[in-house]
């Protein structure tokens, strides 16, 4: 996924996976590994995971599960760093449940898994209730 956005609201990236829990009281361990490319000075934003496109697993925090802030002393930057997120979710269903990475930033040219593209993964693991 090479995704760029300057949306002030959470924006879907298309980086997603689904699981169908076997029990309604099961939990789902969501593990995300990707990277973030920064090419602007003084950036604020974040990454989070949404369940079924409606529930932000980062809750009401403005920057979600993985906030970022980067200050580069007023210079154009060229920096890529790893991003890891984990969350133990309680979807309370036995229906197929999707988890998708969402992104927001206050600057142009930031990218999720951008320019020097690396491997990325979403691992979903059911934890029996």
Image: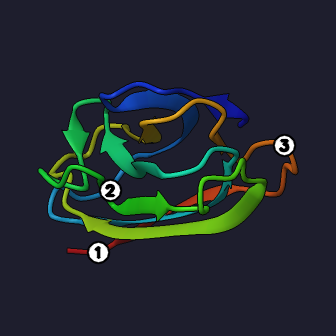
Q: Secondary structure at mark 3?
A: loop
Q: Which residue lies at the image location 80% right of the left edge and 57% below the top edge?
A: 119
> Which-is-in-front pick, marks 2 and 3?
3
Are there few (<14), some (14-19), or many (20+) residues within 10 Å of tag 3?
Answer: some
Asked which quadrant contains residue 30, the reply is: bottom left
How far is the residue under mark 1 from the one under mark 3?
Answer: 39 Å
Quadrant containing the C terminus in the rendered view: bottom left
* Residue 1 located left or right of residue 31: right
Query: Image quadrant for the N terminus?
Result: top right
Q: Nearer the viewer, residue 65 or 30?
A: 65
Residue 36 is left or right of residue 127, and the answer is: right
Which of marks 3 and 1 precedes in the sequence?
Answer: 3
Question: Looking at the image, which residue is at 34% across and 32% down?
Answer: 10
Question: Is 108 or 127 nearer to us in this picture?
Answer: 108
Q: Is residue 128 left or right of residue 33?
A: left
- Dot 1 falls on a residue whose secondary structure is loop
Q: Residue under circle 1?
A: 128
CA distance for labels 1 and 2 = 8 Å
Label 2: which residue?
Answer: 22
Residues at marks 1 and 3 touching, judged by CB atoms closer than 8 Å: no
Viewer-nearest residue: 51 or 107: 107
Which one is earlier in the sequence, the residue at label 1 or at label 2? 2
Which numbered dot is residue 104? none
The reply to whether discs 1 and 2 touch (Cβ–Cβ < 8 Å) is: yes
Which residue is under mark 3?
115
Looking at the image, residue 73 lies above or below residue 113: below
Q: Position of residue 88 (x, y in %)?
A: 29, 70
Which mark is nearer the camera, 1 or 3?
Answer: 3
């Amino acid at each position: 996924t090479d995704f760029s956005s300057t949306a002030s609201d959470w924006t879907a990236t298309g980086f997603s996976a689904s699981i169908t829990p076997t029990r309604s009281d099961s939990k789902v361990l969501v593990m995300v590994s990707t990277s973030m490319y920064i090419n602007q000075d003084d950036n604020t934003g974040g990454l989070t995971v949404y369940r079924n496109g409606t529930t932000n697993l980062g809750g009401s925090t403005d920057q979600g599960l993985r906030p970022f802030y980067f200050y580069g002393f007023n210079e154009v930057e060229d920096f890529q760093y790893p991003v890891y997120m984990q969350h133990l979710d309680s979807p309370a269903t036995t229906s197929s449940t999707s988890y998708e990475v969402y992104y927001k930033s206050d600057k142009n040219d930031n990218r999720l898994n951008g320019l020097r593209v690396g491997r990325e993964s979403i691992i979903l693991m059911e934890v029996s209730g």
